[in-house]
Amino acid sequence: MSQSTSVNEAVLAVESPSPNKGITALVTPTTPLGFWIYLMTDCVLFATLFATFAVLRHNTNGGPGGDELFSLPYVLAETLILLTSSFTCGLAMVATHAKRRNWTIALMAITALLGAAFLYLELHEFAHLAAEGNNWQRSGFLSAFFTLVGTHGLHITIGLLWIGVMLINIARQGLTASHIRRLGLLSMFWHFLDIVWIFIFTFVYLVGASGV
Amino acid sequence: MRRTLSYIAGFVLSIILTMVAYAIVVNHYVVGWAAVFSLVGLAVVQLLVQLLFFLHLSRHGEANNRLLLFDFTLIVVIIVVAGSLWIMHNLHYNTEPQVEVLEEHIVHDEGVKPQH
């Protein structure tokens, strides 16, 4: 592996176990900033979904509203699980920067398990709603609900896939420079999803339960 | 160690803020719009907690760029959300499907006297 640094860029040889040995890739330290810009656009996306939900929150088409449909203890469990997964993800980053490979793997695996538990609870809630006829076609309120919460759930799913890929990569190749960089992006992504969930929890479930 | 403490502090604060919000709604300590404002306040505080303790946003060093981008995004978000709510409320008000409610808007809010 050869390294040389100039003022604005670092050139790192990409470690790879197979035919592309020795190929160098230009890795600038601006990748986290670029990923942050993507997260900001994701923020605007969620903002539009929140705005839609806020506008449609009373359009229940004669059907049930948030106060009737949502179980607050259940949602609290989801919230605490996702929050804990964000915490373990943070600890995983501490382990990564300390170059502790096994701790990184363990903590990211715990993060994934908690994320999977969250997703399971969410899908269970969706299935329960749909089984009673309260699917996204029932009313504008439910359309907005499923779109907003479903989009967040889709992000979580992709995050779980990403964690899985990273776990395999780190197990096989160790904490290489590019894996460390990618873990940083992944943890930004995961923290961001928990932040979005704070607002879903507050506006969809808690405020919904208040009937305002 | 400092980073670890940062995550622990963020975690504990977030749990507290979540539980307070939950308690307010479940026990009806506050109701109606007052409840909404308290919940929004708690959510915003938890947002700041997680931005600081989990995402390490700050005005120092490299994180300053991210903070700047976040501020811009926040402006866009506020315009999108507040603007949508304002416009849709206005639209709903002006295209009320129930005739009685619409006439009440015209007579009481717009000051137009009824002709019959």
Image (tube, grey):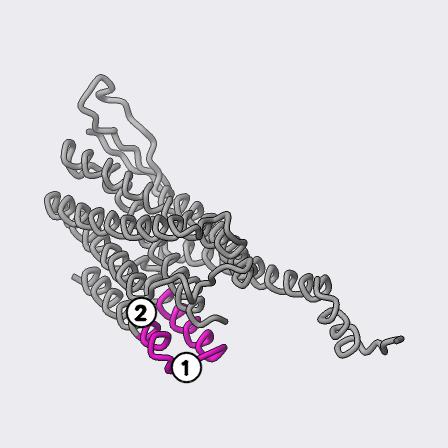
Q: What residue type is labelled 1?
A: Val
Q: Nearer the viewer, residue B10 or B62?
A: B10
Disc nearest the viewer among 1 and 2: 1
Q: Position of residue A99 (x, y in %)?
A: 14, 46
Question: What residue sits 70% from the left and 62% below the top?
Answer: B97
Q: Residue furthest bottom?
A: B29
Q: In this view, does A95 lie to the left or right of A27?
A: left
Q: Nearer the viewer, residue B71 or A208?
A: A208
Q: Is residue A70 left or right of residue B11?
A: right
Could you tell me which chain the residue with mark 1 belongs to? B
Q: Position of residue B10 (x, y in %)?
A: 26, 66
Q: Are discs 1 and 2 less than 8 Å apart at CB?
A: no
Quadrant in which the N terminus of chain A appears: top left
Q: Position of residue A44 (x, y in %)?
A: 50, 52
Question: What residue sits 44% from the left and 77% below the top?
Answer: B35
Seen in the picture, residue B62 relative to A76 is either above or below; the reply is above
Question: What residue sits 35% from the left and 73% below the top?
Answer: B21
Q: In this view, does A204 lie to the left or right of B75?
A: left
Q: Residues within 10 Å of mark 1 (few under 14, many from 20)?
A: some
Closer to the N terminus: mark 1 or mark 2?
2
Q: Name the residue tied to disc 1.
A: B30
Q: Which segment is the magenta one?
A: B20-47
C-alpha span from label 1 to label 2: 16 Å
User: Does residue B31 belong to the magenta stretch?
Assistant: yes
User: Does residue A126 belong to the magenta stretch?
Assistant: no
Magenta-highlighted stretch: main secondary structure?
helix
Q: Name the residue tied to disc 2.
A: B18
Judged from the image, the secondary structure of the residue bearing numbered disc 2 is: helix
Q: Which of A138 and A205 is in front in this view?
A: A138
Could you tell me which chain the residue with mark 2 belongs to? B
Q: Which amino acid does label 2 sit on?
A: Thr
